[in-house]
Amino acid sequence: MGQATSSKTISFFTKRSDSVYEDISNRFTKATVSTLAVPVVIVAYPILNAYTFQESDITGFRIIDGTIGGLLGVIAWPLAPFFAVWGAVTFIFKEKPPRTINVPPEIRAKAEAEIQLDTVSFYNVAVVGMSGTGKSSLVNAIRGYKDTDKRAAKVGEVETTAVPRPYPHPDLTTMVIWDMPGVGTKSHPRETYFEDNYLCAFDLLVIVLGNRLMQDDIDISLKAKQYKIPVLYVRSKADQAIASKEARHQGDKEFVWATAVGELVLEVKDSVFSQLKESRLNTKKLFIVSSSTLRQFVSTINKQEKRKRLQLIDEERFMTSLIEGVLAKRRKK
């Protein structure tokens, strides 16, 4: 395992004729970088054969052969692709969306008046879920901030978000990440949660999950489907789950980590993945994420911090899907 020495040509989004936002190469013809100067990514590929259901995209990267991963336990390669396009992505998000979101004008007006949701000048991402699932930490991680940062969303063991709170992304300047109240609380009853928080007016929803998919998560997903709102599912606090599993194994540190990840992946397959499938929801948008690792990834990409290595599960794929989903929602007709 080590860094490659060749250069790579990157195409980040799929090129389509209907939108400049579908392909960064419409503005930047080629993004070519040397892989010598960027961090190495360590991606879990455990020998527990957890990736036999990889075609469903629950985790991992399709570009790597599963047999190779099974032999090595982990796969390492430079983080060149994301580095190559990050500047182009930030450039696109300096401009306001090409069109406003497609919701009834009266709902858009109420959302702007009651929670100050600006759908004209900004892309809006709502992070939702049950209380205590780690929503606020994920909001901070997407923005590259530690929970202790003065610009971070407030984090607590109990519900700390009473009303929807917007947090601008420091690099993607027309993207706003919203920390939403916990669903099913006394102040935010599940029966009217989607409507009360104007979720139909957002560009994308991130539903943060614990060990299982709850009925509230399913209800929000089905309503989002009616409005054609992209939904990403995040099985959060992966680092905590992995740490408890690592304690049961001995050996090479990276091998133990990859083995623990494999056990977690199998657990997620048997629980959340199966529940999504039974509910006919998109299993390809399920991600296993550590907020701490995601923050390190974002802060490394925007060069706030320097690292030689990153251990990732789905953090890179999650950020890619978030960016692509938001842009696709506002695609020019």
Image (spheres, rainbow, N blue to C red):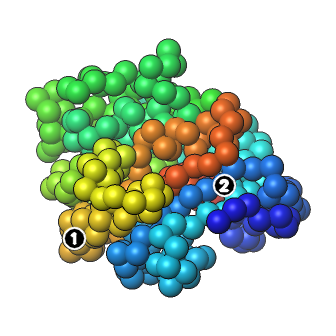
The residue lying at 70 percent from left, 58 percent from top is 78
Q: Which quarter of the figure is the N terminus placed in?
A: bottom right
Vertical placement of residue 211 versus 158, above or below: below
Q: Which quarter of the figure is the C terminus placed in?
A: bottom right
Vertical placement of residue 303 versus 266, above or below: above
Residue 169, position in %: x, y? 58, 33
Depth check: give the residue in front, 21 or 168: 168
Could you say which quadrant of the image residue 56 lies in?
A: bottom left
Vertical placement of residue 314 versus 91, above or below: below
Which mark sits nearer the N-terminus, 1 or 2? Answer: 2
Depth check: give the residue in front, 205 or 259: 259
Residue type (three-letter) at the residue carrying disc 2: Val
Per the model, the C-alpha gap separating discs 1 and 2 is: 31 Å
Residue type (three-letter) at the residue carrying disc 1: Asp
Q: Which mark is residue 40?
A: 2
The residue lying at 28 percent from left, 69 percent from top is 266
Task: State left or right for residue 31 relative to residue 209.
Answer: right
Which residue is identified by label 1? 270
